[in-house]
Image (tube, rainbow, N blue to C red):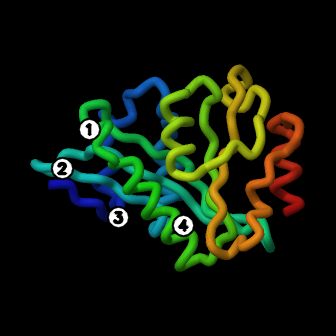
Amino acid sequence: MTTIRRFCCNDLLRFASVNLDHLTETFNMSFYMTYLARWPDYFHVAEGPGNRIMGYIMGKVEGQGESWHGHVTAVTVAPEYRRQQLAKKLMNLLEDISDNIDKAYFVDLFVRASNAPAIKMYEKLGYVIYRRVLRYYSGEEDGLDMRKALSRDVEKKSIIPLKRPITPDELEKVCWKG
């Protein structure tokens, strides 16, 4: 049986095996602690029998005005637990919190342009490619900014794709304007 619960400090010492996937971004402990302290509603873990961590999701809420949105910073499931819809359950939880508690307009995430299985999964969950960010990952690989409109965005304006790719510098400027 799988339990989805809030991430806690002790989990930081137990989730390294989930992060071993080469497509999973890993961060330093202070980064995880910041998310845990600032956005605890957006940080959950899927735990299996024997208290084994099967996967987790980490996110936040940010922006202003019509750019107010939930953001998926990381979602990952250990290889042996994939194809059981755990990522879908974790994503749905973050979307529900963004929509019903924080009244966000959309949820966004970034994914490596080469990560076809993840892109396909996000598309099945209703996400669209909003824009390409050139050399987003370590200055080498492009990232795709994918979005899903929530109930507050009645006209679905938040998911109208941009016509041209942007650079990470432009991404920062766009974020601060909005």
Locate residue 168 relative to residue 20 in the image: left or right.
right
Give me the residue at 72% from left, 32% from top.
Answer: 136
Element marked by disc 2: loop
Q: Position of residue 115 (x, y in %)?
A: 55, 27
Determine which of the numbered discs, if any, sits on residue 38 in the image.
Answer: 4
Gap in Å between the C-alphas at discs 2 and 4?
26 Å
Q: Position of residue 4 (x, y in %)?
A: 29, 60
Give me the residue at 40% from left, 55% from top.
Answer: 90
Of marks 4 and 3, the one in the foreground: 3
Give me the residue at 80% from left, 53% from top.
Answer: 160
Three-letter code, disc 1: Tyr
Q: Circle 2 sits on which residue? A: 48
Q: Circle 3 sits on which residue? A: 6
Neighbours of disc 1 within 10 Å: few (<14), some (14-19), many (20+): some
Element marked by disc 3: strand
Gap in Å between the C-alphas at discs 3 and 2?
14 Å
Task: Classify 10 as above or below 131.
Answer: below
Give me the residue at 51% from left, 39% from top.
Answer: 27
Gap in Å between the C-alphas at discs 1 and 4?
28 Å
Q: Position of residue 66 (x, y in %)?
A: 79, 70
Neighbours of disc 2 within 10 Å: few (<14), some (14-19), many (20+): some
Q: Earlier in the sequence, mark 3 or mark 2?
A: 3
Between 117 and 103, the one nearer to me in the picture: 117
Three-letter code, disc 2: Gly
Element marked by disc 1: helix
Q: Earlier in the sequence, mark 4 or mark 3?
A: 3
Of marks 3 and 2, the one in the foreground: 2
Gap in Å between the C-alphas at discs 2 and 1?
9 Å
Determine which of the numbered discs, if any, sits on residue 81 in the image.
Answer: 1
Labels 1 and 4 touching (C-beta < 8 A): no
Labels 2 and 1 touching (C-beta < 8 A): yes
Q: Earlier in the sequence, mark 1 or mark 3?
A: 3
